Amino acid sequence: MTHLLPPPGACDTHLHVYRPGTPTVPGALAAPETEEVGRYRAMRDALGLSRAVIVQPTAYGTDNRVTAEGIAELGRAETRGVAVVDETVSEADLRALTEAGFCGARMQMLPGGIIPWDQVDRIADRVGGWDWHVQLQMDGRLLPEREAQILSWPGQVVIDHIGKFLDPVRPDHPAFRCLLRLIDSGRVWVKLSAPYEVSRDGAPDYEDVSVLARALVAHAPERMLWASNWPHILTTPRPDDRRMLDLLQDWAPDAATRHRILCENPGVVYGFDSAIMEPDTSKPAG
């Protein structure tokens, strides 16, 4: 496979940053002491990416300071953040987070997450008043149980990691069909990312998850986003970042569709300036 050369303005919509010595919440699954923004910047530049969305790690709970520092270090104009907040968050806090570059609230509903389901609706209502989206990570097999609830939230919803089906399903599975219905609401987006987290087929193609990614792109390319999920803290061995980007050529073979996924769609969700989102005329790098 030839390497993908991203177009100007290409965005990585999901990464985490950490700081040595930062306190973690009780029971945190992982919090590396070696990751830093400089390492991410080097990886991003090597891949040819321009923009980034830093997602608050669950390990830091509702203390979003490290993520805010990461936004500032990478540059407020080209970086956004997704925070973790609970139902006690104040309007002053939401204002400060918005000014710092945050535009979404993370709901991590798998082990390690700190937001319970009985708070999610109230949080969604609160952040909706600031034009934030809700970022949801859960076992995609359970989406039908939450479909009505997800559709009740105001504003946009971003679903992580190709639906995060913990046991990969087929495209005709009821839970995947539910994901397509959510997308068809016009308010739900999906991140094409982290196939290695759930794939049973494994590297290099992660075919059992890639088949879902291809189906999502074919169904609604205008609702797809791409992400690295750097630094892959719970995966051994860590996946190759170049390979993760190159997989987008398999999932979205058309250059115009990749431009939409990498540039135009993140511009809508995260509010990036559209000035450099020109059509993709680049050719794959050899």
Image (cartoon, grey):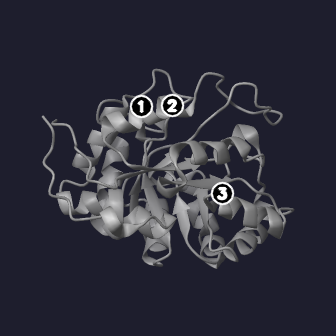
Q: Secondary structure at mark 1?
A: helix
The percent position of residue 220, horizontal first and vertical second, equals: 34, 69
- How many angstroms separate mark 3 from mark 2 (CA)? 19 Å
- Check disc 2 and give the amino acid type: Gly
Q: Cβ–Cβ below 8 Å for labels 2 and 1?
A: yes
Looking at the picture, tell me which residue is in the foreground, 263 or 126: 263
List the residue tagged with mark 1. 42
- Give the left or right position of residue 133, taking residue 26 as reference: left
Residue drawn at (58%, 48%) of the image: 71
Crowding at mark 1 (Cα within 10 Å: few <14, some 14-19, many 20+) = few
Looking at the picture, tell me which residue is in the foreground, 89 or 9: 9
Residue 134's image quarter? bottom right
Q: Which mark is residue 38?
A: 2
Above or below 235: residue 282: below
> N-terminal of the two: label 3 or label 2?
2
The percent position of residue 186, horizontal first and vertical second, equals: 45, 78
Q: Cβ–Cβ below 8 Å for labels 1 and 3?
A: no
Residue drawn at (69%, 41%) of the image: 66
The percent position of residue 180, horizontal first and vertical second, equals: 42, 68
- How many angstroms separate mark 1 from mark 3 (CA)? 23 Å
- Check disc 3 and give the amino acid type: Ala
- Check disc 1 and give the amino acid type: Ala
Crowding at mark 3 (Cα within 10 Å: few <14, some 14-19, many 20+) = some
Q: Quadrant of the C terminus?
A: top left
The percent position of residue 247, horizontal first and vertical second, equals: 28, 42
